[in-house]
Amino acid sequence: MQLEEYQTKRNFEKTSEPRGQQHGSGKSRFVVQRHQASHLHYDFRLEMEGVLKSWAVPKGMPLEPGVKRLAVQVEDHPIEYIDFAGKIPGSEYGAGMVEIWDKGNFKLDRKAPDLLEITLRGERLSGGYALIHTGGKNWLVIKQKAKRK
Ligand code: MN
């Protein structure tokens, strides 16, 4: 069960985050949520395999080509989380304010065991991005240079 870790960490009587279930929507959406938890970070989520594959990006998504940012993979989140914004109460996991920083669609250009190449089409983020698995939960997210035609 891909959402078991997500559900185990949270008390859904206390948090307004969705409990969720695994299901495909047939879409390829992404979201970046600005999360003012004990440490500010940005949560980058891709709709894949019936869940949101998720990374916490401490310094935020790169906006300039060639810039690399650490992205720490976290537990899969339910698809419904793509619309979540609000305050996670003080005693709960991830307590703090969540705001939607960007959302849109993506195209999966390449998927290999330690590599994802995607093209994002959002309001703030657009173009090619690579996610490179460097070990454990650590990935690097890199904005790629625009391809010349
Ligand atoms: Mn977070």
Image (cartoon, helix red, strand yellow):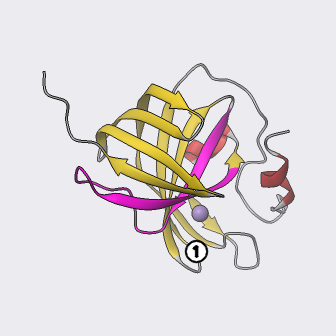
Looking at the image, how many numbered discs can be counted on the residues? 1
99 or 119: which is nearer to us? Answer: 119
**Residue occupying image coordinates x 58% and y 74%:** 37
Q: Quadrant of residue 97?
A: bottom right
Residue wearing tag 1: 37
Q: Quadrant of the C terminus?
A: top left
- Ligand 1 within 8 Å of disc 1? The answer is yes
Q: Quadrant of the N terminus?
A: top right
**Secondary structure mainly formed by the magenta segment:** strand
**Residue occupying image coordinates x 63% and y 23%:** 25
Position above or below: 80 against 100: above
Position above or below: 139 against 116: below
Numbered range of the magenta stretch: 51-75
**Residue occupying image coordinates x 52% and y 29%:** 111
Tell me where residue 82 appears, x and y as whole percent: 57, 43
Q: How would you rate the neighbour count of disc 1 (Cα within 10 Å): few for under 14, some for 14-19, many for 20 or more?
A: some
**Residue occupying image coordinates x 76% and y 78%:** 91
Tell me where residue 140 appears, x and y as whole percent: 46, 55
Q: Residue furthest left?
A: 149
Tell me where residue 9 appears, x and y as whole percent: 81, 62
Q: Is residue 73 left or right of residue 19?
A: left
97 or 134: which is nearer to us? Answer: 134
Q: Is residue 133 left or right of residue 18?
A: left
Position above or below: 116 against 70: above
Q: Is residue 135 left or right of residue 147?
A: right
Q: Quadrant of residue 118?
A: top left
Question: Is 131 colored magenta in this rendering?
Answer: no
Q: Quadrant of residue 50?
A: top right
Q: Amino acid at mark 1?
A: Ala
Question: Is 68 colored magenta in this rendering?
Answer: yes
Circle 1 sits in a helix, a strand or a loop, which is it?
A: loop
Q: Quadrant of ligand 1?
A: bottom right
